[in-house]
Amino acid sequence: MKKILLMGNPNVGKSAIFTSLTGINARTSNYPGTTVSYTTGTLTVLKKGSACASCCKSSCKGCSYGFVEKIEVVDVPGTYRLDPLSEAEKVACRLLPEGDMIINVVDATNLERNLNLTLQLLEMNKPVIVVLNMWDDTIHKGIKIDVEKLSEMLGVPVVPATGTTGQGIDKLIEYITNYPQEPVSKREYKNRWAAIGEIINAVQNLENRRHTFLERLQDISVHPFAGIPIAIIVIIAIFRVIIGIGEYLIGIMEKLFERFYTPVIMALSRLLGGEGVLHQIFIGDISGETIDYEAAMGVLTTGVFLEIGIVLPYILIFYIVLGFLEDLGYLPRLAVLFDRFMHRVGLHGFSIIPMMLAMGCNIPGILAIRNIESRRQRFITATLTAITIPCFAQSAIIFSITASYGTGHVFAILGTILSVWLVLGSALSFFVEGTTDTLIMEVPPYRLPAFKVLLRNLGTRIYGFLTDAFPYVLGGILFVNILTILGVMDFLGKIAAPIITGVFGLPEGTVASFVVGIIRKDAAVVLFEPLNLSGAQMVTGVTLLIIYFPCMATFVIMLKELGLKDTFKSFIIMVIVTLITGTYIRFFMNVLKDPWLYVIFTVLLSFTVMLVLSRIADKRHQAKYM
Ligand SMILES: Nc1nc2c(ncn2[C@@H]2O[C@H](COP(=O)(O)OP(=O)(O)OP(=O)(O)O)[C@@H](O)[C@H]2O)c(=O)[nH]1
Ligand SMILES: [Mg+2]
């Protein structure tokens, strides 16, 4: 099968064109580096018979029927160059020799810079078609491009297109099917930038026009004075909206469960005779006419309600908000704004993107570190993400279960993980060899997200959540129930007691949570519910569940991305951080008593540690290079 590679700079719309060509959903979003590995799909085209290429009589069978050709299309990660630096660029360059044809997707609003890669691709002696994507934006911005002239100067077909609406795709397919058969002539550009200048002068014309509202917003949101307060307001607003709407939806879900699901469970419970091993595993402890779904602990009661009743509503809102910000192009602006601050923990601003993604699910977060060039920063970002960022399924259960303890306790948990992030980040930056380079990142313009694209991305994420997470939660609860019945949990509890009870001050019953937490964190947090923990114990337990280990799936991805040695180092760090944090919370929550006092003290202390460490690191750095 013929293989076509979709290649181009990051964030030019390759995945959007890929989806239009193949009908396969590839993740698109408005920041460079969305695609970190490649996706393949098939384009099916109707071709004329070879004998018909010249005849075209209406009576000719080849002409009227033609034949079906299947072409493999590959959505390649973005690259600026063919001498790769980052992991994602390496993937792109490795794929290059395999392609029979290259579709070079170009951001037409940024033709000059994009042509650098185009000319490099033209030197590869392969058939190339140039797609001038973002054609809609090009028109809005008053940029005029003479397509025919450009095609003539490059010596290859050029097609204007809009990836999000599919405009221009027909023409592109026509060019693909009718590409001339003769071998491509050898090309070489001695002075690439001079050639680009010549092309731009000949084909591009800019019109003067007024700034749009989005462009003004663009300027304000990266302005150092206005940008940071806006970012803080945006982040607080996001959480308020998610929690507010999430709680509202959970209320509706509870009613729906009570109305439609409770009678089914009751009937099933009667069928199982109201007791016994199977009843305990699948239904759990229910009494009376209403079911406490969070505490029952049956696979079909707590397991199902946990994911559909609590996590799904939160995840839905979270992904709607994150999807909107991603497609609008806000995340790279956060990266620029927080760049200086992130340097204190040994990272540059880009690392904020993997971390934001990890708040939804840690896996896409860890995968996004491929766009970070230095190994040191990849290690620090992955370790910090795996230890301190709870996925939203976990956060949802935390909000829902700890809310009854009061806002102070919720903040005590959030404040502690923020502090671990600050202290651990600056410690890693201090101890891990190397320096942090300056942020060089392309910030895309704001683009109003297309509703269709938002919906498609949301659909993919929710489908992924339901198919990937749901079975693990049911399996996790089934697993714990069986272990409990077999007495294994009691046994593990006794073994782990010296640490769990002795050091952290938690009851032995919490061991089950730490066992399940290896598989799924949301299922683990809910196991605290029936234990009647004190406020301080809840803060300790929930915080330790966040930091002691990422879920198994994330850990496997870490192994793949970081390799065995670095993942092992990360793991050792997790164990040490868990021991220190557990001891810290137990001690200071007991000494300070009030959770708010604890939050203020802990956050101030961690900021101080961060400042001291980064000051010493600066001094050390200066001494080394003076
Ligand atoms: N206005 C407009 N937006 C587009 C067009 N094509 C893509 N986009 C948007 O541009 C952003 C980037 O698109 P992607 O398809 O993710 O770009 P990509 O080249 O695959 O990006 P990476 O995988 O990060 O290299 C997304 O927000 C798309 O919705 C277009 O023709 N017009
Ligand atoms: Mg992409």
Image (cartoon, grey):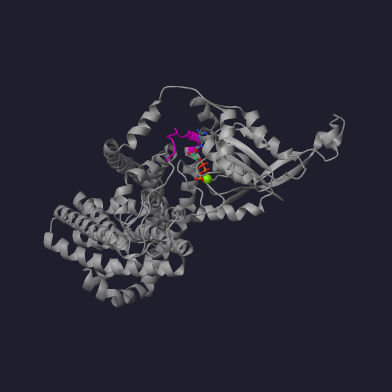
Q: Is residue 466 visible?
A: yes
Expressed as whole percent of the image width and height from the top left, the position of residue 386 reads 37, 60
Q: Is residue 429 above or below residue 36?
A: below
Q: Which residue is more in the foreground, 580 or 177?
A: 177
Residue, x 38% and y 56% (percent of image)?
A: 301
Q: Which residue is more in the foreground, 485 or 590?
A: 590
Classify residue 347 as left or right of residue 609: right
Classify residue 612 as left or right of residue 145: left
Residue 450 included in the magenta stretch of the image? yes
Q: Is residue 25 above or below residue 599?
A: above
Expressed as whole percent of the image width and height from the top left, the position of residue 316 reads 41, 44
Q: Is residue 545 visible?
A: no
Residue, x 33% and y 36% (percent of image)?
A: 221
Classify residue 15 as left or right of residue 494: right
Expressed as whole percent of the image width and height from the top left, the position of residue 204 reads 56, 28
Q: How many numbered dots are placed on residues in this image?
A: 0
Residue 81 included in the magenta stretch of the image? no
| Residue segment shown in magenta | 443-453
Task: Classify residue 20 by image quadrant.
Answer: top right
